Amino acid sequence: MPKILDGAAIAAAIKQEVAEEVLALAAHGIKSGLAAVLVGHVPASEIYVRSKVQACAELGLYSDLITPPGTVTTEEMLALVAQLNARDDIDGILIQLPLPAQVDSKALLDAVDPAKDVDGFHPVNAGRLLAGRPALAPCTPAGVIEILKRSNIPIAGQHAVVVGRSDIVGKPVAVLLLHQNATVTICHSKTRDLPAITKQADILVAAIGRPGFITPEMVTPDATLIDVGINRLTTREEFDRFFKGNAKREATFAKRGSTIVGDIDPKAFELAGAYTPVPGGVGLLTIAMLMSNTVRAAKMRRGL
Ligand code: NDP
């Protein structure tokens, strides 16, 4: 039987550790805080940001939710970021993406003080990460490493294949795996004979954004499968492709009109040595690592 890598339990353990660190900092008179910037009304972003603010409250972190209108300009956003950079009560700045088309997202992310860049998206943090220097690492990739380590999955010497090379997931997860001494192969849409490579993986990380893209034929038995993908299925045809006859999923689909599948076909999980389920896997680590980065930023900024 494959081992299920339980994102909920691992995220809870990390949050518990963060809560203890928050208390320890408070004992020294330090109150760590996160500013969450949510522009306009994007329902998915509203849900994500609400969860992040709620996690702050649970862990005793201060949070400030700032909600500029959807008509905000790049200049107004840059002025807001400059204010947040200067505020001593703010250790982490989170700008929820995507931003409206008229806002220059890159200019904005580059304007965040790298010391407060708890998403780990600033080029300075990307460079530090690559160079193996202390850095705020992007939350989802950092969560992948936590899942592997805390589940006692060996990384050193293993062949890790990462499918996807985005700046926020694929590239940083590949760098973090390399720092853990894995032999890393990065694949993307131009990779020739992808299945031949994915089949060599001891650890396969899928960050593609295509429902069930990694099929059982692309996986070697007993591999560890890490599924970063979050894809919402809304049609009966899509649903049946992955979950026909699955009573639990049927119930969710009937209630919500949709369900979530990762970038790995759930049938491939049956072959695995271990895997992260979707939902219930990597996704839950992202917020936990954001909280962890906020406390880390609070400590680093004060030279602790
Ligand atoms: P991007 O769209 O930025 O990147 C997708 C990557 O997949 C690209 O590098 C692309 O290659 C590659 N790709 C696309 N099609 C193929 C193909 N046919 N064969 C091989 N590679 C392919 O996505 P993200 O990295 O932002 O996100 C990936 C997934 O992870 C999404 O499902 C997203 O929802 C999820 N996600 C989950 C998070 C979480 O909290 N769990 C957080 C962030 C993302 P190329 O570069 O050549 O175009």
Image: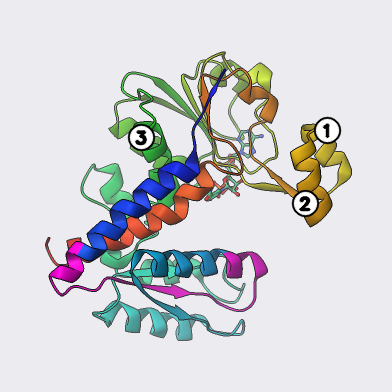
Q: Is residue 142 visible?
A: yes
Q: Are marks 2 and 3 in contact (CB under 8 Å)?
A: no
Residue holding disc 1: 244
Q: What quarter of the picture does the N terminus occupy?
A: top right
Q: Residues within 10 Å of mark 1 (few under 14, many from 20)?
A: few
Task: Indicate the position of residue 245 as horizontal and vertical percent values.
Answer: 83, 31
- The magenta span reads 24-47
The residue that label 3 is drawn on is 150
Q: CA distance from mark 2 to mark 3?
A: 31 Å
| Badge 1 or badge 2: first in the primary sequence | 1
Residue depicted at x 23% and y 64%: 23
Residue type of the residue flagged with mark 3: Arg
The quarter in which the C terminus is drawn is bottom left
Count neighbours of disc 2 (C-alpha within 10 A) and say few if under 14, some if 14 to 19, many if 20 or more: some
| Residue 2 image-quadrant placement | top right
- The residue that label 2 is drawn on is 258
